[in-house]
Amino acid sequence: MSVIRPYRPSDRAAMYEICVKTADAGADATGLLSDDALWGTLFAVPYVERHPDLAWVVESDDGRTIGYIVATDDTDSFYGWFRDEWWPAFRDKYPRPASVVTREDRMIEYGYSRAPGLDPNTAEYPAHLHIDLLPETQGQGLGRRLIETLFAELERRGVAGLHLGMDPNNTGAAAFYERLGMVPLPAAPGGQSYGVTFG
């Protein structure tokens, strides 16, 4: 039986793999970008670098990491750190595009554009998360357990609320968040956001 446990540094490579295997609206995004690692560099690994205490993984019976949840309890602070400390190490590898035309351009521009105050939902919903589960884990209640684990820790810390952004094409994820009591929030064009308050 799969178990949920806190993130360990030895899970880092699996974070990259799981992120790309679920990045295309929940499906495998391998080969969609010139560098598959960009997905994890943006949406998984910086969270475990900044907040390993807000990261949990699903470990299979045979010891493989097959899912995760990562979060920050303060989006604006996280985006400041991402801009000033995380992303500069990747600027040579991912030069800023002169114009944003392709999906890869949009992803790279996302890395360059993170900054405090960027997301209008952070005042009421200061925390945010990313959750990814390989298909073999889905339908077993593990996503709900990961979310409940994170929510309990955020409530313990006195965080007012949490938001998340997602690809609107991932209808299964949207239904999952709504079943958890999350409500739709304003989102950028082409995106979808949900939020929940605590306390």
Image: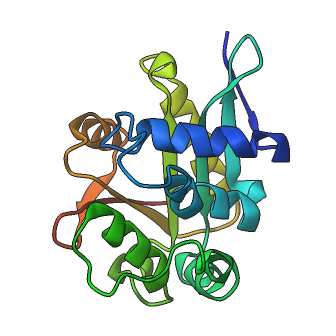
Residue under the image location 25 percent in, 41 percent down: 170
Residue 17's spot in the image, x, y percent? 58, 38
Examine the rendered structure and indicate whether residue 110 appears above or below residue 76.
above
Examine the rendered structure and indicate whether residue 148 appears above or below residue 127.
above
Residue 142's spot in the image, x, y percent? 54, 26
Residue under the image location 43 percent in, 39 percent down: 30
Outermost residue, left side: 189
Taking the image as shown, residue 54 lies to the left or right of residue 142, namely: right
Residue 8's spot in the image, x, y percent? 82, 43
Q: Please tell me in which quadrant of the rendered image residue 154 appears.
A: bottom right
Residue under the image location 36 percent in, 76 percent down: 121
Taking the image as shown, residue 84 lies to the left or right of residue 31, namely: right
Q: Please tell me in which quadrant of the rendered image residue 103 appears.
A: bottom left
Examine the rendered structure and indicate whether residue 43 appears above or below residue 56.
below
Taking the image as shown, residue 168 lies to the left or right of residue 17, namely: left
Q: Quadrant of the N terminus?
A: top right
Q: Please tell me in which quadrant of the rendered image residue 60 appears.
A: top right
